[in-house]
Image (tube, grey):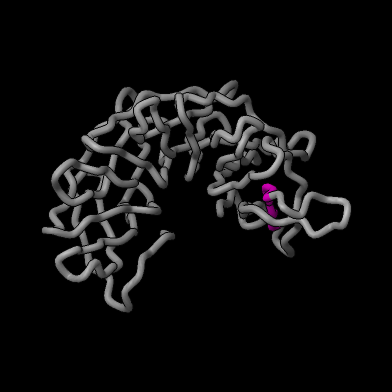
Amino acid sequence: MAGDAPDDVWAVGNFLPDAPSSNQDATLTLAMHFDGNRWISTPTPDAGPIFNTLFGVAAAGGHAWGVGAHLNRDFNVRGLIETWDPAVGVWHIADSLEPGPQRDLLFGASASSASDAWAVGEQQNSAGKFGTLVERWNGRQWQVVPSPDPGASGNHLNSVLALGANDVWAVGQRKDAGSPDHELVMHWNGSAWWVLPPADHGTASAARYSMSGNSDGLWAVGETTDPDAGGHRSSSAFGCTTSLKSSSYHVPGRIGQRSGA
C-alpha cells in the first residue's frame, strides 16, 4: 500500500474472477484507490493470459506504479509494471524490460517524486542462479540499474524505500555458499549501490521483507530461521540510521515472520 496524500492512497494485489463469462482459472491484477472517504476498485490491465499479480505499489505527485509478475504465453514468469496516469484516470502496462534470461519478477516499489520511482525484485540467469533486479523510472521510461550480488549462491530484493534521488534503500536476502543466508541491505547514493555488512545471527539464516522510515531513521522487518533450534522461525527487525550504522533486534512474540514495515 502507498499513499501520496490522505485522499490518494493505493492498494494492489490480485483476484480470481467469478463472472460466468470470465476465465475462472485466471489470476488477474487488482488495484484499489482510497479517495479520503471510501475504497474504489479501479480497472487494471493484464499482461498474461492466465496469471497476473501486483506485489507492490508506489505513489508520488498524483501518479502511481504497481509492480509484480505475470506468466506470458510461453509460460515464462516476467516482471510487470503498471502505471496510473492521473491525466486520463487509467492504468496502463509499461514496456517490459525482461532482463532475466530465464525469468524476472518485481516485489517492491517506492517513489520520491513523479519523475523518480524504483522497483526491485529478482532475475534468474541461464544457469539458474538468482540475482538482484533494480529498475528505475526517470519520468520518461523505465531502465534497469546495475545492482550488486554479494551472495555466492543467490540474491533477492523484496522491498525498496526511495527517500530522494540520491538516497534509496533496498532489502532482501543473500545466499552464501557454506554459511547461513544473510539479510541483504543496500543503499543507493546517486551513482552506485553500496552493500551494508550483514548482522551476525550465528547459525541462523536471515531475510528482510519490508522497509519503512525517513531521513531520521529506517526500519526493516523479516525473520531468522535457525537449523540448530529445530528450524524454528523468529521475527526480527533491522534498524539503520542515515550514518549507515545498523543494529538488529529480536521481536518478542510467537514464532513467525514480519512482512510489513
Question: At x 43% / y 40%, what residue is drawn?
Answer: 162
Determine the image quadrant of residue 156: top left
Tell me the quarter of the image containing the N terminus. bottom right
Q: Residue 157: image x %, image y %?
A: 38, 42
Query: Image height check: is 170 above or below 2?
Result: above
Query: Image height check: is 66 above or below 259?
Result: above
The magenta segment is: 27-34
Task: From the viewer's perspective, tell me whether residue 106 is left or right of residue 228.
Answer: right
Task: From the viewer's perspective, tell me whether residue 211 is left or right of residue 237.
Answer: right
Furthest toward the right, the residue is 21
Looking at the image, can residue 99 be seen? yes
Tell me the quarter of the image containing the C terminus. bottom left
Query: Image height check: is 88 above or below 251?
Result: above
Question: At x 31% / y 78%, what residue is drawn?
Answer: 253
Is residue 201 in the magenta section?
Answer: no
Furthest toward the bottom, the residue is 253
Question: At x 11% / y 58%, what residue is drawn?
Answer: 202
Task: From the viewer's perspective, tell me whether residue 84 is left or right of residue 17.
Answer: left
In this rendering, the count of numbered labels is 0
Is residue 32 in the magenta section?
Answer: yes
Question: At x 76% / y 49%, what residue is drawn?
Answer: 42
Determine the image quadrant of residue 87: top right
Tell me which secondary structure the magenta stretch mostly adopts: strand
240 and 158: which is toward the camera: 158
73 and 68: which is toward the camera: 73
Task: From the viewer's perspective, tell me whether residue 133 is left or right of residue 217.
Answer: right
Q: Residue 209: image x %, image y %?
A: 38, 53
Looking at the image, can residue 131 be seen? no
